[in-house]
Image (cartoon, rainbow, N blue to C red):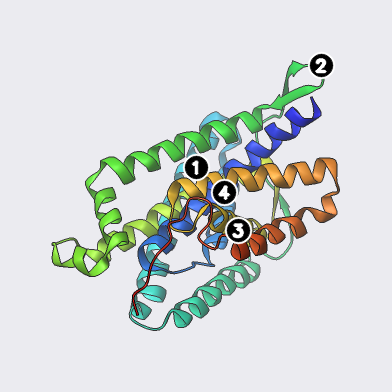
Amino acid sequence: MIVLQQLINGLSLGSIYALIALGYTMVYGIVKLINFAHGDILMVGAYTGFFVLSAIGAGPMGMLLAFGVSMIVCACFGLTIERFAYRPLRTSPRLNSLITAIAVSLILQNGARVLPFIGPNPRPFPRPNVFTIKIFEDLTISNIQITVIILSAILMLVLNYIINYTKRGKAMQAVSFDLQAASLMGISVNKTITFTFILGSVLAAAGGVLYATAYPRLEPMMGMMPGLKAFVAAILGGIGSVPGAMLGGFILGITETFTRGFISSQYADAITFSILIIVLLIRPTGILGKKIRVKV
C-alpha cells in the first residue's frame, strides 16, 4: 500500500512537471531555444492566482477564475517576451538567445522581489478545504491530488487536440519540421512561434496554480526548481517531443516521490539531476526523441 500511495503522490507531482515540460519542449521543437524563463512564468501564474483567490475566496468559482485570469496574464507575458526578447535574436547564434533567456528569468525573479505588492517574503497560498478520501486501509488520496491529476489530464488532451487536429497545430508541426519550407508554403512563421509561446505560457500558468495549490507557499524564486525539473523531464522524454514531455514529467514525479518516501528527501534533487546526466550520457535524444543525422 505504501508503494501505491507514493505512486499516487508521484502522479500528482508528475502531472505538474508534465504541464511545465510541455512549454519547454514545444518552444524547443519550433525555434530550438531553451526558454529558461519558463519556470518564472509559472511563478507569475501562481501569484496571479493568489491575488484572484485573495479577492474573491478559494471556492470552486474562485479557482476557475484564478485559472482563467492567470492564463490570460501569462499569455500576455509569453507574447511580450517572445516579441521583444527572443524574436530580434532569432537569426543570431543560439548562445545569444540562451543568455537572453537566463536574463529574462532573472528580471522576472528580481522584478517580483522589488514590487511592493509581491515582495521577497514568502506567502501562504489560499486554497480550498483539503480532505482525504480513504481507498483502502493505508491508501488515501486528497481532493487536491484528484484536482491536479484531472485538470492536468484535461489540459494535455486539449493540447493534443490543438496540435494534431487544428490548423494552427498543423502549422506548428510544419514550422517544427522545416521553418524555411513552412514559410515558403505560406505559413506565418512569426504568428506560429508567438502562438507556441502563448500556448506554453498558458500551460505554465495552469501548472503554477496547481503547484501552489498542492504546495501552498509563494515566493519570487518558487518557479526556479520546478522549472529546472520540468526541463529535466523534457530532456528525459525527448526534447521536442510532446508525448515525451508528458512521459518524462510522470517518470520524474514518480521517481522523486519514491526517493522521498523510501530513501530520503535530502537526495530527491540530487537523484533528479543525476537522471539528467545519465540520460545525456546514454541516450541524449531522450526516451521518445528522434535521432537526427547531419550531413557534413
Disc 1 and disc 3: Cα gap in Å? Answer: 25 Å
User: Which is more toward the observer, 293 or 122?
Assistant: 293
User: Which is more toward the observer, 133 or 163?
Assistant: 163
Disc 2 and disc 4: Cα gap in Å? Answer: 31 Å
Residue 143 found in image quarter: top right
Q: Which residue is mark 4?
A: 248
> If the image is split into quadrants, where does the C terminus sit?
bottom left
Q: Are marks 4 and 1 in contact (CB under 8 Å)?
A: no
Q: Secondary structure at mark 3?
A: helix
Q: Earlier in the sequence, mark 2 or mark 4?
A: 2
Kind of residue at badge 2: Glu
Q: Position of residue 101 (x, y in %)?
A: 50, 73
User: Which is more toward the observer, 234 or 83?
Assistant: 234
Q: Earlier in the sequence, mark 4 or mark 1?
A: 1
Q: Are marks 4 and 3 in contact (CB under 8 Å)?
A: yes
Q: Is residue 28 above or below residue 42?
A: below
Q: Badge 2: how crowded within 10 Å, few (<14), some, or many (20+)?
A: few
Q: Of discs 2 and 1, which sits in the foreground? A: 2
Q: Of discs 4 and 1, which sits in the foreground? A: 4
Q: Position of residue 266 (x, y in %)?
A: 84, 55
Q: Which residue is mark 2?
A: 137
Q: Earlier in the sequence, mark 4 or mark 3?
A: 3
Disc 2 and disc 1: Cα gap in Å? Answer: 34 Å
- At 32% from the left and 62% from the top, the residue drawn is 193
User: Which is more toward the observer, 243 or 145?
Assistant: 243
Q: Earlier in the sequence, mark 2 or mark 1?
A: 1
Q: Is residue 282 left or right of residue 175?
A: right
Kind of residue at badge 1: Phe
Disc 3 and disc 2: Cα gap in Å? Answer: 35 Å
User: Residue 232 got which mark?
Assistant: 3
Kind of residue at badge 3: Val
Is residue 101 at least partly visible in the picture?
A: yes
